[in-house]
Image (cartoon, rainbow, N blue to C red):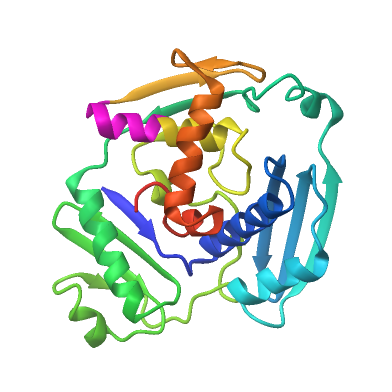
Amino acid sequence: MFEKVNPSHPDKVADRIAGALVDMAYRLEPNPRIAVEVLLGHGRCLIMTEASVCLDINEVKKVVDRIAGVGISVELNQCAQDVHLAGNQTKGLRCGDNGIFKGMPVTAEQRKLTKLVKEIYKQFPTDGKYILDGEKLIVCQSNASHEQLEKYAHGAIINPLGPWTGGPNVDCGATNRKLGSDMADSVTGGGLHGKDLSKADVSVNIYAFLKAQETGGPVELCCAIGDSEIDGKPYSEIVEVARRFIKDAGGFEKFAEWGLIR
């Protein structure tokens, strides 16, 4: 059983905005420290950052306009990173979070649904949510008729409650609320989106997921703030693995579109 949402689901819109702001921070500094939380819905977008950089409010508004739609009111609250946490990184790259992480291989069912969702999204780039349980497929896709969706998902349960428009004027969105869609059977104590690479929630999650694909079995890891080694590797190596993955995805914003299950 697996649920996937598309990049226009309100929670993914929030993830994408957070990712775009992390991208912005990396354009300001080569290795920034940043954590972003986004809550949006019904014409408003509230953004909180804790960071080593100061983001330009006008550039932030452009990001929200581009991803969530023009005319949304933006409230940005920027705070400096805690001095003690910032000091953790002064003597070299170290783990920026406490956390537990479990990477799991992607199943055939998860790959099948992800492929289908991407096909539907190319034709209907609006809010959608989908569930596959064996042969049972549930498709909830906004701004598309039953007949249109039947072409992609014949025999599926389509829009059980009837037509709907979706989007942040129907449902509020928040960062890291769709980790099941992003990670499937993998498990994390934190969130994937809106954080720089020093955060284990980003780097160790990606590393554990990739190792699980290589080994074909579960990969379980834990870490504490300040750890310089995880899984027998320097933390800097873990970060570089994640950096390559994010780069291949096209950046933090693009990574937020589909998460680990791409």
| Image spot of residue 160 (x, y percent) | 32, 73
Q: Quadrant of residue 168?
A: bottom right
Q: Position of residue 59 (x, y in %)?
A: 75, 68
> Which secondary structure is most common in the magenta stretch?
helix
Q: Nearer the viewer, residue 118 or 41?
A: 118
Outermost residue, front direction?
30
Instruction: State left or right for residue 82 relative to residue 138.
Output: right
Query: Which residue shows up at 56% across the image and 68% down it?
Result: 171
Is 212 one of the magenta-colored residues? yes
Magenta segment includes 145: no
Q: Is residue 148 above or below residue 245?
A: below
Please report the residue visible at 36 percent of the width from the left and 57 percent of the height from the top.
Answer: 4
Q: Quadrant of residue 82?
A: top right
In the rendered image, the vertical position of residue 87 relative to residue 144, given as above or below: above
- 57 or 147: nearer the viewer: 57
Residue 43 to residue 189: above or below:
below
Number of callouts in the render? 0
Task: Say if residue 209 shows up in the picture.
Answer: yes
The residue drawn where x is 22% and y is 43% is: 107
Percent position of residue 15, x then y: 57, 56
Height in image: 254 above or below 194? below
Residue interval drawn in magenta: 208-217
Q: Nearer the viewer, residue 250 or 253?
A: 250
Residue 122 point in image, percent of width and height: 34, 76
Q: Is 262 placed left or right of 198 in the picture?
A: left
Query: Can residue 174 be seen?
Result: no
